[in-house]
Structures are given as structure tokens and as C-alpha cells.
């Protein structure tokens, strides 16, 4: 069958998009209830609800076809907020709208409610005619804000014993099905506070370079900063430095600024060593400040301060199964690449030790987190076929 609880993949995506699960915002309780009571249980799937943080449920939805390997597909139930982009939306963000070209617009359509819908429909097919083994869907909370209530909590206590995981993050950057991500990049966020002399701006020629101007010099230096990678991974990946993510400084007109704080981030790749990266940051900042300001560098708490990148061996069994499925459904294998951002693979693979494909799903990352997010209806249907074949390839006897 191509439906779950009477809904095909497009209708199911429509229903999921209609449920507000913004994060920060309302969270995932309503969408988890819908998946549980309107989709999974009517279809006969097992459902385990794991709620480490109140109001932030994770779901393990499963089908057991007997003795054999155990594969998991994973998607997150939350979305980024609509935020300040609301006026730029051409349609209602919570009403999936399909245009004449077969493109469906709606919040979370690409990131990643369309993939979750495709997984649920593929699981229905597996329940009816799949090979021996088990398939679970790991549907997480809080992915868009660091995964503390979701994959991070599950990795510590709550993941089923699975042999491998495939995450349905979009496999396109500008076009669908561009890549299969085997690297999930990490992140390092930090603030640099620069202190100079505050005083009367009429005497600026006597006070030296102010803190905001020194901060500008530091931002310029960080813009060309190349952080060290101690041991490059097997999959080509480069770190990205984003300077000037935030800035605070100045008191009022007439007052020469004596303090300024700037925020920067680095998107990490495998093989980066925390101590080496921090030492290189400190050297770059101190050289750019040139003795004209005091320097204090502070790293954010938790995973935002340092969340390492993870990498899956391209020769692993789940990659071979996924590539065989791509060859069957798409007519070609996908190039192995690094995902531009972070994913729940950080915790599934980095902490729980489960081989994890970081992205294999419908949609384009370039339209996520902004106005007019979209996915092609044809790609939703392709994703159902692809996930069904990933299950078949991974679970077939060796």
C-alpha cells in the first residue's frame, strides 16, 4: 500500500505541516500525539514515547518482521520558527500549498516533515511485504536547538538497539538528490570581548582606537581565519568560519566606546582538535587586537561551545545498502559529501556509536530555515520508494 491510516505521502505531509512544532516555540507534543494516535497505532505500528524533558516527546515507531537485522530511519519533528520572515511568505506557512509545477510550499516541508511522512509510508510497505528483521523510526524532538531534549537525551538513555540509522535530512543543496552526507559537521560558538578606554568622544584623538573599531579589526581577521584540521577525514570536508554573528557595544553618541563583544562560530569537520582550534583562535584575536584592547574569549556552554563533527566510513554496510537503493530508485549512486550543518548523527554516531548516514532525504537545504520553504511532490514519492529499498537492501541476508 502507498498510504498510512488512509493518507498518502502528500496528504500526510500536509497534515504534519499543519501542526505547529516551531522550536523555539510550541514544541513537539501536538505533532507527536498526531503521529501516535492518527498514524502509527491505527496502522498497527508499535509506539514508544520517550519524554526526557516535559512537553518534548520523542517517538520510536516500529515494525518487527521477525529475526534479522534492525535498521532505523530518523527524522526530527520540530521546525525552525517562522520568525521575521512571515511577511515574505507567499502562502500560509502551515498550509501545504502545491503549485502548478508540483512544488509544495510549507514550513518544514523540506526540513523535514516531508521525509518523516515518506518514512511512515515506507514503514507501512515494510509491514505488509518486507523481509525478516526490524525497522524503527526514531522521531526526535529539539533537533533545531541542539537536540538536548531529543537525540542527545536518547543517546544517553532511550535509543533502541539498532544496527544502523539513516537520517532523512534533505540530500539537496540547490537541487534534489545531490549527495549522501556521511559527515555531520559540528560547531564551535564563542564570544570575544574587547576592552579599551571609555571617554568623551570630543577627545577621541587622545583616547586611542575605541573598542568597536578594534572589534572591527578582529572581525576582519576572523573572516580570513583558517582553523587547523589535525587529521582530515576520509570524506572531503572543510570548516566554515562565520564571523560577526552578533555584536554588542557602545553607550551613546558622545561617548567613546570602551567595550565591545562580538560572536563568531566555526562549523567543524572531522579531525579538528579542540585545544588546537582554541589556541589558533586566541593567537588570531590577540594579533588582530594588536595590544590596543584587553581580550577575553569565552565559549558557549554545552554543545554550542564545542560539538564535534562525526564521519561514517564510506565502506560501511549501511552506506552500501543506501547506495544500492539509490542505484535502484534514482538510477545512480550519490556522491559522499559532508552535510553543511549539524544533524542528530552527532549523538547517534558520536555518543551512541551507531553507524549513521547523516542525510538521505527529499528537498533542498537552501530553502530551509527561511520563507517559502518547499519540496517537490515527486521527490516525496521518490523518497518513499527509496526508503523502502534501503530497508530491503539492508535487511536482506548476507
Image (cartoon, rainbow, N blue to C red):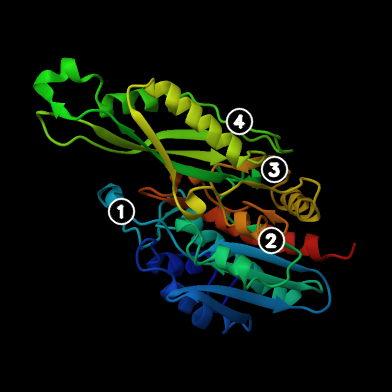
Q: Could you tell me how far apart the alpha carbons at marks 3 and 1 are, in whole angstroms?
A: 34 Å
Q: Earlier in the sequence, mark 3 or mark 2?
A: 2
Where does label 4 land, which residue? 228
Task: Pick whichever, 41 or 196, lies toward us.
Answer: 196
Image side of residue 29 versus residue 273, left or right: left
Q: Earlier in the sequence, mark 3 or mark 4?
A: 4
Q: From the image, which quarter does the C terminus lie in? A: bottom right
Indicate the secondary structure of the residue bearing disc 3.
Answer: loop
| Foreground label between 3 and 2 | 2
Q: Could you tell me how far apart the alpha carbons at marks 3 and 4 are, in whole angstroms?
A: 29 Å
Indicate the secondary structure of the residue bearing disc 2.
Answer: strand
| Foreground label between 3 and 4 | 4
| Foreground label between 4 and 2 | 4
Mark 2 surroundings: few (<14), some (14-19) or many (≥20) residues within 10 A:
many
Indicate the secondary structure of the residue bearing disc 4.
Answer: loop
Where does label 1 land, which residue? 83
Mark 4 surroundings: few (<14), some (14-19) or many (≥20) residues within 10 A:
some
Q: Earlier in the sequence, mark 1 or mark 2?
A: 1
Q: Earlier in the sequence, mark 4 or mark 1?
A: 1
Q: Could you tell me how far apart the alpha carbons at marks 3 and 2 are, in whole angstroms?
A: 17 Å
Residue 23 placement (x, y as % from top left): 39, 61
Image side of residue 34 versus residue 90, left or right: right
Residue 123 placement (x, y as % from top left): 66, 71
Where does label 2 land, which residue? 165
Mark 3 surroundings: few (<14), some (14-19) or many (≥20) residues within 10 A:
some
Q: Could you tell me how far apart the alpha carbons at marks 4 and 1 are, in whole angstroms?
A: 35 Å
Q: Is residue 229 visible?
A: yes
Residue 334: image tag: 3
Amino acid at each position: 500500500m502507498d498510504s498510512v491510516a488512509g493518507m498518502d505521502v502528500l496528504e500526510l505531509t500536509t497534515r504534519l505541516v499543519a501542526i505547529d512544532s516551531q522550536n523555539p516555540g510550541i514544541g513537539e507534543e501536538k505533532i507527536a500525539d498526531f503521529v501516535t494516535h492518527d498514524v502509527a497505532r491505527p496502522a498497527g505500528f508499535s509506539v514508544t514515547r520517550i519524554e526526557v524533558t516535559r512537553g518534548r516527546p520523542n517517538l520510536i515507531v516500529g515494525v518487527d518482521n521477525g529475526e534479522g537485522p534492525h535498521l532505523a530511519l530518523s527524522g526530527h519533528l520540530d521546525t525552525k520558527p517562522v520568525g521575521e520572515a512571515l511577511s515574505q511568505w507567499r502562502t500560509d506557512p502551515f498550509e501545504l500549498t502545491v503549485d502548478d509545477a508540483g512544488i509544495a510550499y510549507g514550513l518544514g516541508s523540506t526540513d523535514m516533515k516531508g521525509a518523516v511522512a515518506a518514512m511512515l509510508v515506507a514503514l507501512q510497505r515494510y509491514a505488509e511485504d518486507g523481509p525478516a528483521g526490524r525497522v524503527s523510526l526514531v522521531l526526535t524532538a529539539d533537533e533545531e536547538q541542539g537536540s538536548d531534549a531529543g537525540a542527545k537525551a536518547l543517546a544517553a538513555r532511550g535509543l533502541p538497539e539498532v544496527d544502523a540509522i539513516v537520517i532523512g535530512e534533505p540530500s539537496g543543496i540547490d537541487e534534489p538528490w545531490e549527495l549522501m552526507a556521511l559527515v555531520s559537521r559540528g560547531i564551535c560558538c564563542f564570544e570575544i570581548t574587547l576592552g579599551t578606554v571609555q571617554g568623551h568622544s570630543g577627545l577621541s584623538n587622545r583616547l586611542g582606537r575605541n573598542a568597536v573599531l578594534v572589534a572591527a579589526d578582529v572581525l576582519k581577521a576572523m573572516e580570513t581565519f583558517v582553523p587547523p584540521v589535525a587529521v582530515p577525514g576520509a570524506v572531503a570536508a572543510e570548516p566554515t568560519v562565520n564571523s560577526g554573528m552578533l555584536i554588542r557595544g557602545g553607550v551613546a553618541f558622545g561617548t567613546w566606546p570602551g567595550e565591545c563583544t562580538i560572536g563568531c562560530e566555526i562549523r567543524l569537520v572531522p579531525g579538528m582538535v579542540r585545544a588546537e582550534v582554541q589556541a589558533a583562535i586566541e593567537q588570531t584575536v590577540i594579533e588582530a587586537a594588536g595590544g590596543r584592547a584587553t581580550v577575553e574569549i569565552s565559549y558557549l556552554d554545552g554543545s554550542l561551545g564545542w560539538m564535534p563533527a562525526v564521519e561514517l566510513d564510506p565502506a560501511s554496510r549501511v552506506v552500501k545498502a543506501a547506495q544500492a537503493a539509490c542505484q535502484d530508485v534514482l538510477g545512480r549512486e550519490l556522491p559522499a559529501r559532508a552535510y553543511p550543518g549539524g544533524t542528530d548523527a552527532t549523538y547517534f554516531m558520536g555518543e551512541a556509536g551507531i553507524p549513521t548516514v547523516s542525510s538521505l532525504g527529499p528537498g533542498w537545504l537552501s530553502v530551509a530555515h527561511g520563507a517559502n520553504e518547499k519540496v517537490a511532490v515527486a521527490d516525496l514519492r521518490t523518497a518513499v520508494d527509496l526508503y523502502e529499498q534501503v530497508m530491503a537492501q539492508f535487511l536482506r541476508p548476507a
